[in-house]
Image (cartoon, grey):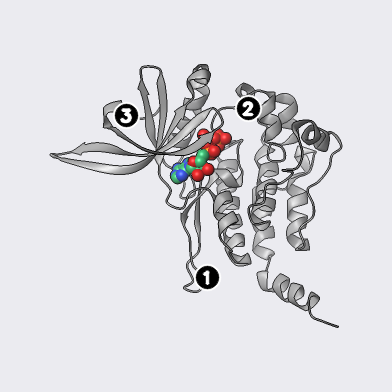
Amino acid sequence: QFHMIRHEDLVWGESLGQGSFTHVYRGAKKDQRDTETHTTEVLLKVLDAEHKNSWESFFEAASLMSQISHKHLLLVYGVSVHKSKNVMVQEFVKHGALDLYLKRSAVSLSWKLDVAKQLACTLNFLEEKNIVHGNICAKNLLLAREGDPNSDTSPFIKLSDPGIGVALLGKEVVLDRIPWVAPEVLETLELGQQCDKWSFGATLWEIFNGGEVPLHRLDPIQKQQFYECHSQLPCLEWTELADLISQCMQYQPELRPSSRAIIRHLNSLITSDYEILHASGTLPE
Ligand code: ATP
Ligand code: MG
């Protein structure tokens, strides 16, 4: 199912923070090839000791990522178990999480659109394989290449593993995932076939709002009410994009567009249309 990595072959580096029931470190993995030892930079995700009974779900995420291969899906090298320490060993992605990147860097509209298209393409791949990810958000998109609009190189993203399943996370953590978690998932604690599309919509919102956390002012009760009232995120100025987001974030899962339709919609968006419109709107009368 997945590759087992010996604990002795791991080198531990600085802490990069914590996730849902995890602590994340930078590190390296040693491989013996013929007579030489190679080292590969890796990301080490350790399941918190107090949640060690979620190990099956944690390793299921690792297994899912090891079974499928796509250029925009993060590589998982394997897992390591040492005493009661459960570790997922994955590809280290140079520029880190997209939400943080967007907060510190100004990027063009076409850069953002490129990222959106890459994510849509990943969504299509997963849909064709009948796989539901269940934890799509800008934090789980890692930036492998920054790209540069002036030299015509695009950014390049990789979707990270989904982590512990919603059924095990507890109400508080799941409520905190509003507005990324699809409303039906909150009720059933099961991932339906259409739930990634909702999360995709919320992620688009994040990307085009410069990494701003949607609904950050709401406490968990208010977040729950947000869904109960079938509310929508504030509309983006770019109407054609706002349309796509609201189609993806429909409360009735069957009404959400297919990933092919999402790709078509994104391909029909032309950034210059929006930029010209936007610029003329700010000109004096
Ligand atoms: P969740 O399941 O909620 O996503 P997690 O365990 O995946 O939780 P994150 O919060 O997603 O933890 O990741 C913590 C931080 O670690 C991220 O903000 C990012 O900066 C960094 N990070 C995660 N994965 C990688 C990676 N593969 N390469 C480089 N940095 C990473
Ligand atoms: Mg993550």
Q: For this rendering, which residue is in front, 157 or 178?
A: 178
Residue 104 picture location, percent across and down: 56, 57
Q: Are marks 3 and 2 in contact (CB under 8 Å)?
A: no
Give the labeled residue for mark 3.
5
Q: Are marks 1 and 3 in contact (CB under 8 Å)?
A: no
Q: CA distance from mark 1 to mark 2?
A: 38 Å
Q: Is residue 38 left or right of residue 56?
A: left
Q: CA distance from mark 3 to mark 2?
A: 27 Å
Residue 233 picture location, percent across and down: 78, 48
Q: Which mark is residue 149?
A: 1
Kindly identify the residue that appears in the image at 62 percent across and 61 percent down: 113
Q: Earlier in the sequence, mark 3 or mark 2?
A: 3
Kindly identify the residue that appears in the image at 50 percent across and 74 percent down: 150
Residue 32 picture location, percent across and down: 20, 36
Residue kind at label 1, given as amino acid type:
Pro
Residue kind at label 2, given as amino acid type:
Val
Q: How many marks?
A: 3
**Screen quadrant of the N terminus:** top left
Q: Is residue 86 left or right of residue 218?
A: left
Residue kind at label 3, given as amino acid type:
Ile
